Image (cartoon, rainbow, N blue to C red):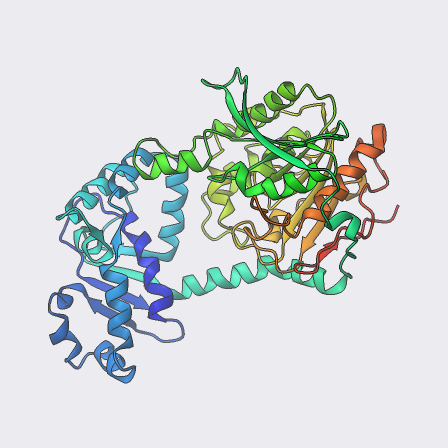
Amino acid sequence: MLRRFLPALASLPLLLGAAPVRAIDEVVLQLPLIDFGFTVRLSEFENPERFWAGTSDLAELNRATNGAVDRQMRAIFDTPLPVQTRDVVSQAAGSPLLQQVLLAASALGQVDGLPLDASGQELTEVLNRASTDGQITLYTLLRAIPGESVTVDLPGAVASLQRLTRQQSQARALVESVPAASVAPARSAPGSRPVRRRVRTMAAPHRDTPLEVVLVEPSSGANGRVVVISHGLWDSPEAFEGWASHLASHGYSVALPNHPGSDATQQKAMLSGQTPPPGPEELRLRPLDVSAVIDGMEASRVVVLGHSWGATTALQLAGTQPSSRLLLERCDDLGDPERNISWVLQCSFLSSADQASLADPRVIAVMAVSAPASLLFDYGAGAGMQARALVVTGSRDWVVPPDPEALDLVPPVLRFGHQLVAADGGDHFNLRAEAGGNGGPLRGLVLAWSDAAFAAGAAAKPALQAPPLLGPGGWGNTDIPLILMPSPTP
């Protein structure tokens, strides 16, 4: 249990007091089902040999486990944290992302004797005190926090895990009740065309500099169809070149823009203290990136694929309208039964949501994989969509859990021809497809969906009781079975 829950204490330095009292010495692990806490005094670890030879409950547990507790505690408390941590916090002070992380941390535990203070200045001062020799460890962090003790609410942590289980239960029921799609070599095997890769820049009037775009295309025999792939937060085009290569081998020209405000390079700069976290304005800038790429490709009809935040971008381009209403109602409610990690990102969009309706009429269909969506898109947000949407959710996704992020969003619009696929065993990361692989578990699906959207012509536009674009089979996968939610009967 120590190994499972003590790493979570790394988040507790975020819970700071307004006026220092004294450095924290006591860590209390509040266990479920019993009426007392398991107490650790940090000062006792200044002489660990004496502590472990003592008669405390923890020392007794250590002897009973042949020193395993000692080894785990040393690994937890003595492991250096990134030396750039102070710079990161200084840059993030006051940002919506940090505020949401603070809320999440406050649900786990508290600093006793002090009111909650989420100021970046106070946190920076703590980190400065913790970094006495250039290395910050969990031990030095806790010793630098002003307060009396840190209490970790383990029942609360257990409740959070139970909530996550509930958020995956509908998807599990779906994959157990509906047969998986069949696998057809014509979809899952590479096509006959050789593929080439190149990088070019494209004009982006909404950015300070041109966009860098990876182009993956057939060397010959292109079919004239264009697909754009939007990556997620702190990701990169390379993570989806497997999709692009598979499509290109079947004739497609695929463009993968690098979103400069929220890509892997931005993450590295943020972790080195050179730039703040992605700002809420990126909610608007990302769809504009894709529209700029469509301009650069000189395309009139395009399919957009997206993963995570890229999936949200795809839904915006399809005509789904973001709104601040649910963000205002629910972002600050720590007890909300549907709260999940993706809300950290969605709630950071509060100030930009009402200005982020950026549909592109050239987009005829989108495939949104693991899309953070339940707060950003209000009820009825999809009523004016001009493009068909295929939403894909992983049954084991804990970052963007299927319920409510997909299973609550999609059913009301299924009657307009939109569709939902659940990936049995899919999590937030194993549905991607890195460069050099076989295209990943969704390779047949991205090809089948793109083929169907282009073949439909004008009928691709959503309409009441529109026939679905995706057929019942031929696009499945043997490693991660894919299940299509049945469309409603007229």
In the image, is residue 449 above or below residue 105? above
Locate the N terminus and report the quarter of the image it occupies: bottom left
Percent across and percent down for residue 139 are 21, 58
Percent across and percent down for residue 300 are 73, 21
Locate the C terminus and report the quarter of the image it occupies: top right
In the image, is residue 125 above or below residue 459? below
Q: Is residue 269 left or right of residue 16?
A: right
- Seen from the viewer's position, the closer of residues 184 and 371 is 184
Q: Which residue sits at x=80%, y=44%?
A: 470
* Residue furthest to the bottom: 64
Q: Is residue 330 left or right of residue 302?
A: left
Percent across and percent down for residue 333 are 47, 47
- Seen from the viewer's position, the closer of residues 269 and 339 is 269
Residue 245 in sight here = yes
Percent across and percent down for residue 430 are 57, 53
Give the quarter of the image for residue 128.
Answer: top left
In the image, is residue 32 above or below residue 260? below
Q: Which residue sits at x=66%, y=44%?
A: 409
- Seen from the viewer's position, the closer of residues 225 and 110 is 225
- Count the numbered circles shown: 0
Residue 373 in sight here = no
Give the quarter of the image for residue 25.
Answer: bottom left
In the image, is residue 127 above or below residue 1? above
* Residue furthest to the right: 490
Q: Which residue sits at x=61%, y=37%?
A: 377
* Residue furthest to the top: 205
- Seen from the viewer's position, the closer of residues 414 and 310 is 310
